Amino acid sequence: MKSSTLRRANLSREKMQVLENLASYKRQQISHSALSANKESQSQQIKERELDVLWNNFKQHAGQDKSPTVYLITGFIAGIIVMTIITIVLHLSVNSINTPSDITDKVPNTKVEDTAITFIPADKEDSNSQKVANSTSGQETYTVQSGDTLENIIIRFYGSYSKDRELAIKNINHMKNPNALSIGQKLIIPLN
């Protein structure tokens, strides 16, 4: 090659020599591959015979092994038996702890109607601005705060929600829409 071509290609003489050696090596490999093709076909036949022998041997031993489904079914049945035993033991232990005689001894003999629970949250502001108790008339005045709903107010004063209590509060406060509460609105809450 010309030296100008070598400079433009950024190849040195040593690199060019390596490239020429590689090309000659490839040519030699092609000529040797034609000779070795015959040898490869013979070795291929030998490998095929060996694979046939191995495959036949594998088929004989595979029939003797247990299949995975046997292990799967056995494990499934064992799991069901163990879970049944655990369930029975837990059921018996819970029933032995909570016998009817224990329950009647621990619960006092009171009626639900006799006990009235009133939940009133702790006041953040002055208690006079929140509620004013009218103990003589059996009602309280409550000032609506941000985030209050009629349902929350009923739960706060009575402990649980009921339609009858909602209706009583709506009637005493002359409310048409219980969802239209405004902050600072005074509500009369009947306590009877």
Image (cartoon, helix red, strand yellow):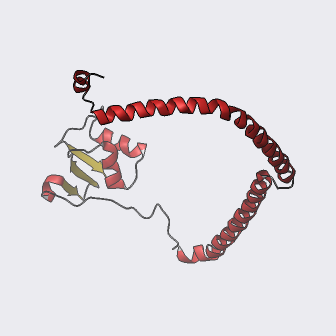
Up-down: is 122 above or below 103? above
The residue closer to the viewer here, 190 or 180, is: 180
Residue 154 x %, y %: 34, 49
The residue closer to the viewer here, 177 or 32, is: 32
Q: Is residue 10 visible?
A: yes
Q: Is residue 192 visible?
A: no
The residue closer to the viewer here, 147 or 15, is: 15
- Report the side of 30 relative to 77 (left or right): left
The residue closer to the viewer here, 66 or 75, is: 66
Among the 4 quarters of the image, the one containing residue 32: top right
- Report the side of 96 relative to 174 (left or right): right
Residue farthest front in this picture: 2
Residue 192 x %, y %: 35, 54
Up-down: is 52 above or below 116? above
Up-down: is 103 above or below 3? below
Report the quarter where the N terminus lies: top left
